[in-house]
Amino acid sequence: MKTAGDLLHISGDMTEAAKSLDQKLLDLLGRNARMSVTELAGKLKLARSTVQARIEKLERNGTIAGYTLKHGVVPGRAVSAHVSIRVRPNGQGDVERKLAKLDGVRTLYSTSGLHDLIAIVAAASTAKLDETIDAIRAIDGVTETVSAILLSTKLER
C-alpha cells in the first residue's frame, strides 16, 4: 500500500502521482459522494490513512465543500465546455450509456429544444478537450454537436 509520504516531495509540492490520486478520488466521489473512506481506499488500492489525508487536504483547499464538487476546480481538468448534442430518434439511451463511459464527460443533462443532451466536458488541455468532443461525435446515434468552451465563472451558488 502507498502512504501519503510516498506521494509528496519533502518540499511539500504536489507530485504528478498526488495530482492523479486526487483526480481519481474526486472522480469516485463525484459518482458516489457517500462512499466510505474504506471503500475509496479499496478502489484506489491505497491505505485508508492516505485516502483520509487526501480528502482532508481537498476539504481544506475548498475543492470538496459539503461533498459537492465545485465546477472548474477539479485538479487536472483545466478546460471545460458545454457540448450540446442532437441524437437520432430512438437512440438516446444508447448514446447516454456510451457518453457515461467517456472519462471527460463530467455531467450529462437531458434537454428540450434543438438539442437532446448537454454534456459538461472537462479536460487537462484544449487538445484533450478536442479529443473528447471528437469521441462524442463518433458515437453512433449522435447527429450533431455544438460546443462552447467555458471561459470564466460569473456566478456559482
Image: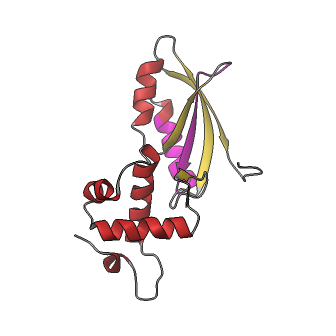
Percent x, y of residue 6: 31, 78
- Which residue of the protein is positioned furthest toward the left in this rendering? 1
43 shown above or below 93: below
Query: Horizontal placement of 102 versus 142: left or right?
Result: left
The relative height of residue 54 versus residue 104 in the rendered view (above or below) is below
- Total labels: the figure holds 0
Of 138 and 13, which appears nearest the observer? 13
When the figure is inspected, residue 122 is found, relative to residue 134, above or below; the finding is below
- Is residue 50 at least partly visible in the picture? yes
The image shows residue 22 at horizontal and vertical percentages of: 43, 63
Q: Position of residue 36 (x, y in %)?
A: 35, 54
Find out whether residue 117 is within the magenta segment.
Answer: yes
Quarter of image, res 54: bottom left
Look at the image and give the residue range highlighted in magenta.
113-135
Q: Say if residue 140 shows up in the picture.
A: no
| Residue 63 location (% of width, % of height) | 56, 61
Quarter location, residue 37: bottom left
| 43 or 79: nearer the viewer | 43
